[in-house]
Amino acid sequence: MGRTVELDELTSEVARLRAEGRTIVLANGCFDVVHVGHVRYLRGARAEADVLVVAVNGDEAVRTLKGGHRPVMPAGERAEIVGAIDGVAFVTIFETLTVEPVLRAIRPDVHAKGTDYTPETVPERAVVAEYGGRVAIVGDPKDHSSTQVLERMKG
């Protein structure tokens, strides 16, 4: 089960794992209402490196990105759920609108994004290129979304 850690502890853990010769992949997202698309995205990300780290958007960022009625669950609970998914080693919560600070801190070998992106449209691609990492597009087609799940629940 993946541990939820602060960024400073994550940075230390990643350094230790790198010293052991292991590769790191970072996936990120809101994970507000976890669905099969999230699981497939994280499985795809995990296949790209030895250790999967997931960065979960903080509550304020989710409100800004998704609207005032979101998140449905607080960041700590979302992180705990993501950490329970097989293959996730570490989870961290980030409070910025982009995951760039996490990328700069841990410099993952691979930055995994979902299929709603292309390598050219990944917002953080320049940061990843700066430190010599690579971007991977993983998961199934973007046929699932938390927003759609919530709309279906409304009836």
Image (cartoon, grey):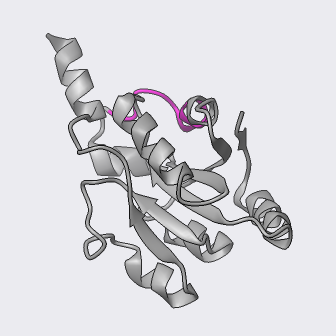
Task: Tell me what residue is drawn at x 41 percent, y 65 percent.
Answer: 136
Quick one: quadrant of the N terminus?
A: top right
Task: Tell me what residue is drawn at x 36 percent, y 47 percent.
Answer: 139
Task: Tell me what residue is drawn at x 42 percent, y 51 percent.
Answer: 61
Which of these two is toward me, 100 or 129?
Answer: 129
Position of 154 relative to 117 (above/below): above
Which of the 4 image quarters holds residue 23? bottom right
* Residue 153: in magenta span: no
Q: Is residue 116 left or right of residue 78?
A: left
Q: Is residue 27 left or right of residue 1?
A: left
Residue 120 position within the rendered picture, expressed as x and y whole percent measured from the top left: 26, 76
Range drawn in magenta? 70-79
Task: Tell me what residue is drawn at x 55 percent, y 86 percent.
Answer: 132
Position of 85 relative to 64 (above/below): above
Residue 112 position within the rendered picture, expressed as x and y whole percent measured from the top left: 45, 60
Q: Is residue 65 left or right of residue 52?
A: left
Residue 155 position within the rendered picture, expressed as x and y whole percent measured from the top left: 14, 10
